[in-house]
Each structure stands twice: as C-alpha cells, then as structure tokens.
Amino acid sequence: MKQFAMESRQTSRNSKAFLAIFFVLVAGSLLSAQLSPPHGAKFEVLSVRVLGDKEASERSPDFIGPNIAVRLRLSSTEHGLEFYGWKNSTIPAGYKVQELDQSIFWLYGKAGTEKKMSSPGLKTALFGSTGDWITLPAHSAVEWEELDSTSFAGEKHAFTAFLKQKNKDEALEVISDAFVVPANVNK
C-alpha cells in the first residue's frame, strides 16, 4: 500500500511538472505570436555598436551607462501602417525588453534595471505625454537608433514599437529581432 501511495505521489509530481512546462511553452508561443509584426511589416535590428566614452557621453549627457547604439528598421511591404511616436517625429515609441528562458521582461525604471512581465502599455510609452500615429506608407521604412548598455553584457535584448495596420483601430505592440548585448571592448 505504501508503494502505491509513493508511486501515486510521483505520478502527481510528474503531471504537475509536465503541466508547468506545457504552460510555459504555450504562453511563450502565444506571447511571441502577439508581439510578432503583422503581415506586411518587418521590425529588425540592423547593427549593434559599442560607443567610445566620448560618443556615449555626448549621446546621453544626463545619464551615465548607455554606451551601445542599436540601429533599428521598421518597414512595410504592400500595405502601409502607422506607428506611435512623438508629434512630428519619425521614431516609433516603445520599450526595451529582455528575452530570458522563453519569457519577455519589459525593462524600465532607473537604468532599466526593473523588470515587468507585461508591457507598461501605450499610455506610458512617451512618459505620459500624448503622441501621434504616424503613417509609414507601403514599400517604405524608417530607421533610428536606440541606446543600451554593456552593463547588460550577455543578455538577449530587443525593442518594441506600437503599430496599427491600415484601416484598423487596434494598436499592437510588436517586438524587434533580438540581439545579444556585447561587452565593453573599449575598456
């Protein structure tokens, strides 16, 4: 009888472990599907470059730490789209994220060291200010740079942007390709 109870408990543990793994895999695939750019849009990392000390301080004079320039490109194919950003700007608003164990964490707060398991959302993408929906016509692209820091060396990061497909009111937060944060080679 004791052996049956022990086998029953082991089976129960195995079932719980299987369900937990299954949930993580399903949630990860659903999350990545929600954050994938819609058909006809591409959001990619073009380059990742460690900045020299002088260039890093010029680009971020009020905050020490950001010393990586990440070149991003958002493009549309046969359909145009809209992205959310500052008024009269060509830079989409969004967040920096970390990919870890098939999960995505939004990095925010002082030096991006605080993590959230869900997006802070569109309303805080511009620090509480109101932006505009900017049209990106079919067969066009916008490129810009975001900053990151070698203090996160070895982590897998990406950036998000808020998009609307043509003739749709629903805003989608999409994620760029991921990149591995390099170490500071300038030291």
Image: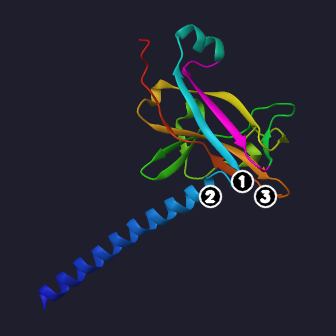
> In the image, what residue occupies the spot 34% across and 71% down?
18
Q: Which residues are magenta?
A: 61-79
Asked if residue 65 lies left or right of residue 134, the reply is: left
Asked if residue 129 lies left or right of residue 1, the reply is: right
Which quadrant is home to the C terminus? top left
Residue at the spot of label 3: 170
Residue 41 in sight:
yes
Mark 3 nearby-residue class (10 Å; few <14, some 14–19, many ≥20): few
* Circles 1 and 3 in contact, beta carbons < 8 Å: yes
Direction bottom: furthest residue? 1
* Circles 2 and 1 in contact, beta carbons < 8 Å: yes
* Circles 2 and 3 in contact, beta carbons < 8 Å: no
Residue 61 in sight:
no
Q: Which mark is residue 34?
A: 2
Residue at the spot of label 1: 172
Three-letter amino acid code at the position of disc 2 = Gln
